[in-house]
Image (cartoon, grey):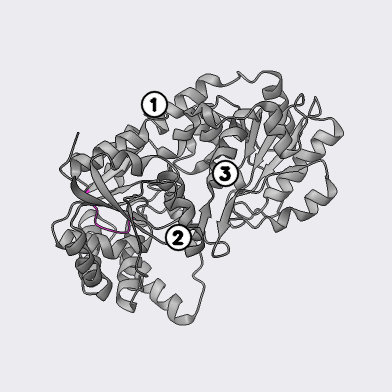
Amino acid sequence: MSRSIALLVPDGVGVRNFLLGRLLHAVGRTHCVDVYHLIPDALLGVYRDRNPAGAGWRPLLPYRETAQTFFVRNALVYAQMYWADTHAMRFERRRPLGGSWRYRAARGAARALGRLASHRAGVERLAAWHRFVVARQREVERYRRVFREARPGVVFATHQTPLEVLAPVVAARSMGIPTATFVFSWDNLTTRGYIAAPFQHYLVWSEHMREELLRFHPYVAASGIHIVGTPQFDPYVDTDLLWTRREFCRRVGAVPDRRIICFSGGDAGTCPEDHLHLRELLQQVRDGRIAGSPQVLLRPSPVDPADRYAGVREEFPELLFARPQWVQSERSNWSRVFPLPDDLQFLCNLTYHADLNVNMASTMTLDFAIRDKPVVNVAFDHASPPRFPGGHWGHYYQFDHYRPVVALGAARVARSPADLATHVNAYLADPSLDREGRRRLLELEVGQPIGQATERIAEVLAAIAGGAR
């Protein structure tokens, strides 16, 4: 057996993409695997029992920033945002600085330095300074001791931004151990663009994401970028996970011979008006403005406690409700919400059996496009003035990662309540509308055949570790 692979899993999406899938089984054919994680003790057995018995399981060490590492990291974040200058980054860097006066002062000074350093040489100098100050922290030395014993052939982070991956990656680099990460979402490189650690290899979804990485991080070596697709969609090709229409409807309380509209909610901070958009959709169905009396099923975001939907559920008892089967160890913290295996199967069936999806600029647009299901994006505002500059349309639908959805005609955007009814009715009458746009979106964003990403990732990691099959 070749040298081990150290798998850093710092959050729930890493658990979903890698520990609920087949990666450890695929990698285990050639390498031992040590999983470094933040999974609560009460849930660890859920994931350990699904994976090879020989895998090691170790907790990630907590990472505590000093005043110096905090300042340098934030200066680097702002330098990256000023340099790349995407729509989302302009919004992010203009956001008011909250917190104590010390926190505001540190962030303000970091923002000023970042603006001065917003060029390639400046970003590279800040990145080197950040590596230097991090390397002096005791967590790095503790990982050196761990890696001397474990002797990994590669240290692989399942998400490129959580701070918990920084110390092990810096430790590995100092020991000559190759490091790699997976860019886990299609918006990561154009929203804030921050990459927590100095990785040598990047596993990306598509050629489009590869081009983004080189454009926004030109110091990344092109030879270290590997196009693998994304494992989060691999379960959609597993027909063994599917229930019959009758069984799915039994589980959600639906009537099998009536259409189902899935409303996918976002988190309360990003999508604060979701409950109002949902209410509008339900009222249109009740009033007959949406034809055929379809059923509406709400699936809130896994990180959303969904309290804000309580009034809508009371007013519209016909609303179907499917809470994601994720366990929140810390309220409203994306990185501390962990999926249960049953949720993966439910999502496979939801996207398969629902007839149409409604969301606000969500990744669920891709999930439903994989099933060739139409999507209506909501882009009208209830608040006056709007909560975001330019309203929902001028804000989220101008984000770099989401503009292709609109440009390719992969979904229809409702910029008013009347648009919502019009687009939903059109798609219910003819679900094949905009099929070509959906196909082109998947070709651009995912790039690789669905269902093969896990094997490709395993092959890349084996090759980096020196054990390619």
Q: Where is residue 338 in the image (x, y as percent from the top left)?
A: 51, 55
Q: Name which residue lies at 57% across and 44% down.
A: 343
Res. 347 image quadrant: top right
Residue 102 versus residue 26 in the image, above or below: below
Callout 1: 10 Å neighbours few (<14), some, many (20+)?
Answer: some
Distance from disc 2 to disc 3, alpha carbons, whole Å, reads 17 Å
Whether residue 90 is visible to the viewer of this picture, yes or no, is yes
Q: Which of marks 1 and 2 is nearer the N terminus?
A: 2
Q: Where is residue 330 in the image (x, y as percent from the top left)?
A: 54, 65
Res. 134 image quadrant: bottom left
Q: In this view, does 270 lie to the left or right of 74?
A: right
**332 and 424: which one is in front?**
332
Whether residue 211 is visible to the viewer of this picture, yes or no, is no
Res. 397 image quadrant: top right
Residue 401 versus residue 134 in the image, above or below: above
Q: Name which residue lies at 53% across and 45% down.
A: 341
Distance from disc 1 to disc 3, alpha carbons, whole Å, reads 24 Å
Callout 3: 10 Å neighbours few (<14), some, many (20+)?
Answer: few
Mark 1: secondary structure: loop
Q: On residue 39, which mark appears? A: 2
Q: Which amino acid does label 1 sit on?
A: Pro
- Magenta range is 195-200
Q: Is residue 173 left or right of residue 227?
A: left
Mark 3: secondary structure: helix
Q: Is residue 274 left or right of residue 210?
A: right
Q: On residue 342, which mark appears? A: 3
Q: In this view, does 424 lie to the left or right of 326?
A: right
Q: What residue type is labelled 2?
A: Ile
Distance from disc 1 to disc 2, alpha carbons, whole Å, reads 31 Å
Q: Earlier in the sequence, mark 1 or mark 3?
A: 3
Callout 2: 10 Å neighbours few (<14), some, many (20+)?
Answer: many
